[in-house]
Amino acid sequence: RTCGPSDKVLLAVCKVLGITMVISWLYVVIVVAVCCLYFLYRPLNRIKASPWQLSPQWVNGLRRKKRVGNVPPPFPNGWFAVLESKELKRRQIKNIDVLGQSLVVFRTISDEVFIVDSYCPHLGADLGQGCVINDTIECPFHEWKFRGADGKCVDIPYAKSVPEVAKIKSWSCYELNGFIYMWYHVEGDGPKWFPPEIPMVTDPSSAFVGRTEHTVLCHIQDIPENGADISHLTAIHSEFFLLPQIGQRLYHNWEASWTPCEAPERYCSQMTVTHSLVLFDKFRLMNMNITAKQIGPGIVHLRFMSPGCSGYLIQNVTPMGPLEQRIVQHFYVSSRSIVPYAKLILWGEALMLERDIDVWNKKIYISRPILVSEDRQISKHRKWYSQFYSPNSLSLEDVRQTLEW
């Protein structure tokens, strides 16, 4: 039949509503897709809050119950990451407490970084409350200026001259791979080696996948010793990282070896790992080859090679106290990598690390462990790691007495 005027209006309204609904659904789909892409590609920032950070009573109780054991000196000699580069802006000062030292880190207007002792030798003011002027840090109390490069006082505004003894200790530092490193040596010797640069970190075509940060209550040597403890991989890291309760239907398979490096890189060791995720004992998924190079006592560069992901994970372990370590990791991948997949790898690595941390927090260090022949690499690792201690390295008791005072 012929449509009347009212029918035409109704038809037009229906068309408009239909078009509006289609546009609305398209809008919803686009918003959801953008949000998914945002969360898939946004860098991961996993900071695992440890129980003692949430409850001081927890850590005090653990320390009362936990036997320490006959541990090596708590502060080995070497390079340690004290800050991430992004944490320190130009003309900014940061107070840090690492390796039993109270220090300040500051960045000049010309982007140079210096590390010096925290307290002014004049009347003990905290230089962290001062300001950065050119290449010096100025004391907030009487405006004494100390040069970052050597710690020498270069100006006392109300004095005719500057005494030769007016200086603070300046620590060797090195900014590399997104971190600020400090050289620590108990005898005051200068750097004997330097960590290598990873070009992928500064390559504009590479992607920063994210970072993780953990705090651990253990001796620093317990952490790199994991690299030589091959048998722990099956015991702790075989269960699927997302759903451990799945059991043997889906599990991680590890094949690994550890060896110390020869001269001129005797301060390095290397762990080689082949990984696969095994489904029903037949199908191998997430195949990857990992080379973990330990550089000195607290730096590890892990090279990941897998279909869909190729990159470097930089791990830094820094002693915040005699038996308290901070682990910070950054993960970078090549331009050809699938970023969401790389993010999954970083997340999985963090969850695996947290399984180790649960053990480290409650274990003791045994200086003369009972080992079987399959554990021989642990003895080799301890011999290799001993090069980072020297005759004057402070014992745990010496450090504790100093901190208590």
Image: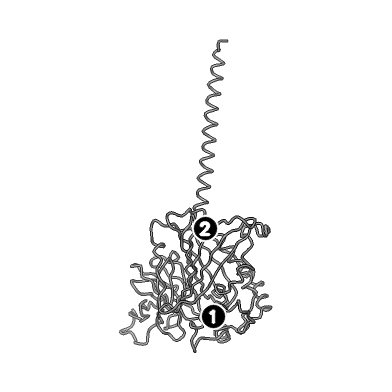
> Image quarter for residue 326?
bottom right
> CB atoms at circles 2 and 1 under 8 Å apart?
no
**Image quarter hosting the N terminus:** top right
Residue 149 image-quadrant placement: bottom left
In what element is the residue under mark 1?
helix
Position of residue 270 measured from the top left corner of the image (x, y, whole percent): 49, 72
Residue 232 in the image: state x and y as whole percent: 61, 71
Residue beneath disc 2: 44
- Asked whether, in this view, residue 168 is left or right of residue 224, the answer is left
Q: Amino acid at mark 1?
A: Lys
Q: Of residues 96 and 23, which is closer to you in this image?
A: 23
Indicate the amino acid at tag 2: Leu
Q: Is residue 288 above or below residue 69?
A: above
Residue 136: tell me if it is visible: yes
Counting from the top left corner in percent of width and height, residue 384 is at: 50, 81
Left or right: residue 33 versus residue 198 is right
For label 1, the residue is 380
* Towards the viewer: 219 or 367: 367
* Quadrant location of the C terminus in the rendered image: bottom right
